[in-house]
């Protein structure tokens, strides 16, 4: 069991509706030593790739992705959720359905911060149905950037996102993959990974 799986078992809470709450250490209160370890682990897994920019989506991806960007010594750009319907031509836009809030948001990245030929590593806290990742991939590719990989802290392997992204041919690394969880008794089962 790796450092993250141990922490999820200790402090994660399984909620109804396939939601795993990790807000005491990952995406509300943040354990900075753990964030540093996550940053180092993604560097270990993607360090052989020519990453020139880390990309994520607000809000909870930002804190994690910052530690990854620091390891690679590259900038971090995050997609912003935008309510505005008149988005001008200076933005890359994608539509993303939120798993936790069940609403759709347009997410935007300014064309000033993503360019053709850049090598992007996409980072997020969770992977469920894959909408957030697909939105980020579509933004990166409309800019003409190369998606070098996707790094996820917690993949819920019983939802379709992981399969969809891997089938699309992207290099996806998830630090923990939850194959089953039960809100009634709080149990969490992880997929074996090397
Ligand atoms: P997807 O777009 O893959 O369906 O969902 C991923 C996004 O939804 C992540 O950015 C994350 O913020 C949120 N999310 C999905 N599942 C969970 C969960 O079980 N717990 C928490 N805290 N967030 C989740």
Image (tube, rainbow, N blue to C red):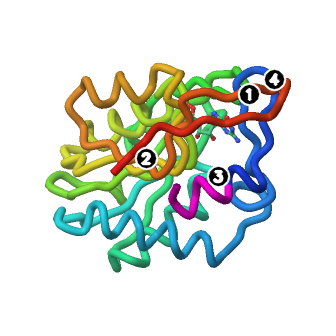
SS for dot 1:
loop
The reply, left or right, for residue 156 in relation to residue 99 is left
Q: Closer to the observer: label 2 or label 3?
A: 2
Q: Is residue 93 magenta?
A: no
Q: For this rendering, which residue is in front, 152 or 82?
A: 152
Q: Secondary structure at mark 2?
A: strand
Position of residue 181 measured from the top left corner of the image (x, y, whole percent): 68, 29
Note whether 110 is above or below 67 in the view shown.
above
* Residue underneath mark 4: 16
**Circle 1 is placed at which residue position?**
101
Q: In the rendering, which numbered label is found on residue 174?
A: 2
Q: Are marks 4 and 1 in contact (CB under 8 Å)?
A: no
Asked whether 114 or 100 is in front, the reply is 100
Q: Nearer the viewer, residue 165 or 159?
A: 159
Residue tagged 3: 60
Task: Please give the name of the residue rendered at 24% of the width and 55% of the height, measured from the top-left corner.
Answer: 115
- Marks 1/3: CA distance? 13 Å
**Mark 1 sits near ligand 1, with its Cβ under 8 Å away:** no
The overriding secondary structure of the stretch rendered in magenta is helix
Mark 3 and mark 4: Cα distance apart in space: 20 Å
Is residue 43 visible in the rendered image? The answer is yes
Label 4 to label 1: alpha-carbon separation: 14 Å
Residue beneath the point at 50% across and 40% down:
177
Question: Is 88 situated above or below 3?
Answer: above
Circle nearer the N terminus (4, 1): 4
């Amino acid at each position: 069991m790796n450092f993250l799986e141990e922490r999820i078992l200790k402090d994660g809470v399984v909620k109804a509706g396939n939601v795993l709450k990790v807000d005491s250490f990952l995406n509300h209160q943040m354990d900075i030593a753990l964030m540093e370890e996550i940053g180092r682990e993604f560097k270990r897994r993607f360090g052989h790739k020519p990453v020139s920019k880390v990309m994520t989506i607000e809000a909870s991806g930002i804190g994690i992705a910052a530690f990854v960007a620091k390891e690679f010594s590259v900038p971090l750009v995050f997609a912003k959720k935008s309510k505005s319907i008149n988005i001008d031509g200076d933005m890359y836009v994608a539509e993303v359905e939120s798993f936790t809030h069940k609403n759709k948001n347009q997410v935007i990245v300014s064309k000033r911060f993503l360019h053709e030929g850049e090598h992007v590593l996409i980072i997020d806290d969770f992977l469920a149905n894959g909408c957030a990742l697909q939105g980020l991939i579509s933004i990166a590719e409309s800019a003409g950037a190369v998606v070098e990989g996707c790094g996820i802290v917690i993949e819920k392997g019983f939802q379709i996102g992981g399969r969809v992204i891997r089938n699309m041919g992207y290099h996806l690394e998830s630090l923990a993959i939850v194959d089953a969880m039960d809100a009634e008794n709080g149990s969490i089962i992880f997929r074996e990974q090397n």
